[in-house]
Amino acid sequence: MSALPLRHVTACAPGKVNLSLRVGPPRADGYHPVTSVYLAVNLSETVTAVARQDDRITVGPSPRQVSTVDDALVPWDERNLAHRAAVHLRETLRLDPATHGVDLEVAKQVPVAGGMGGGSADAAAALLACAALWETGLSRSELAELAAPLGADVPFAVVGGAAVGLGTGTELTPVAARHRVHLVLVPASAGLSTPVVFRTLDELRRDGRLPEGSTPPAVDEDVVRALTRADPRALALSMENDLQAPAVHLFPELSDVMDLGMDEGALRAMVSGSGPTLLFVAHSEQNALRLATAIEERAGVTALPVHGPVPGAHVL
């Protein structure tokens, strides 16, 4: 007797921080070559793919699990990356739409528009859930390759861990980070548009207020060594982010919170990715907990103690 078809599959995928982000000048196609050191952290997006008996693909907040961020900030239509991932998978594999409809239920933990790849994690989790629901047999590496057209951070959300990303960030080389890095993340009350941050970087470079980037941007070997040696102090000293200056230019209040975190004993304060989420490097889990409490009390903001690396997208 044949097995009954799956009715729903739940998968989750992690958010990320950029421990290093070097950005080159824009290419002819408008994209910037980047070299990044990614770290997947234990804030995750959860997507449940529920089979439909028609060709429709829908996306919405999960009735099964509670989001910890404001769902009203998320576009629940064809613009949603989870929706785009399901469409992309169905079209790429040429699956029959009449028998491959799906309702996508999303529960979010990663700050929205915070430079932590929350939408990319939604896409990665949706890819994995739909691939399992539709019994495609695709491997993780095949899904990561298929994920690249969806966005620069989506392949990393599929594989997780720690990795160097080249090109637009989609060419990944794993980093053997076997020990936890403890961080405190401070999401901002308002988001920053990633394209606007990149455009501001270009403007600041054209005006001579920032040095020009190299092509291709060099890999930050000091950050990679610090990760593999589990040395938080060396990591803190070597981290760089070319998008920090434009993010602070657009959102000057970020500097005040970074100064406060350093005053409370953080090893390093930095904008994560295109911002406006801030990350602070801590000595240990205990230090991260104390630092998060101090930042919340002094600045009146949310501060989240997190760690990484954690695994990439996986079925629950």
Image (cartoon, rainbow, N blue to C red):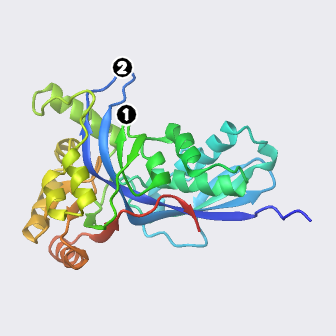
Circle 2: element type: loop
Which residue is rendered at x = 14% and y = 67% of the image? 266
The residue that mark 2 highlights is 28
Is 127 on the left or on the right of 296, as rendered? Answer: right
Instruction: Identify which residue, 215 or 178, lies in the foreground.
Output: 178
Q: Are marks 2 and 1 in contact (CB under 8 Å)?
A: no
Which residue is rendered at x = 18% and y = 48% of the image? 248
Instruction: Identify which residue, 1 or 191, lies in the foreground.
Output: 1
Which percent across, then down, holds residue 216? 28, 29
Which quadrant is home to the C terminus? bottom right
Circle 1: element type: loop
Which percent across, then down, holds residue 281? 20, 64
Say which mark, if any, is on residue 167.
Answer: 1
Residue lying at the far left of the rendered structure: 263
Q: Earlier in the sequence, mark 2 or mark 1?
A: 2
| Above or below, 283 relative to 129 | below
Residue lying at the far top of the rendered structure: 28
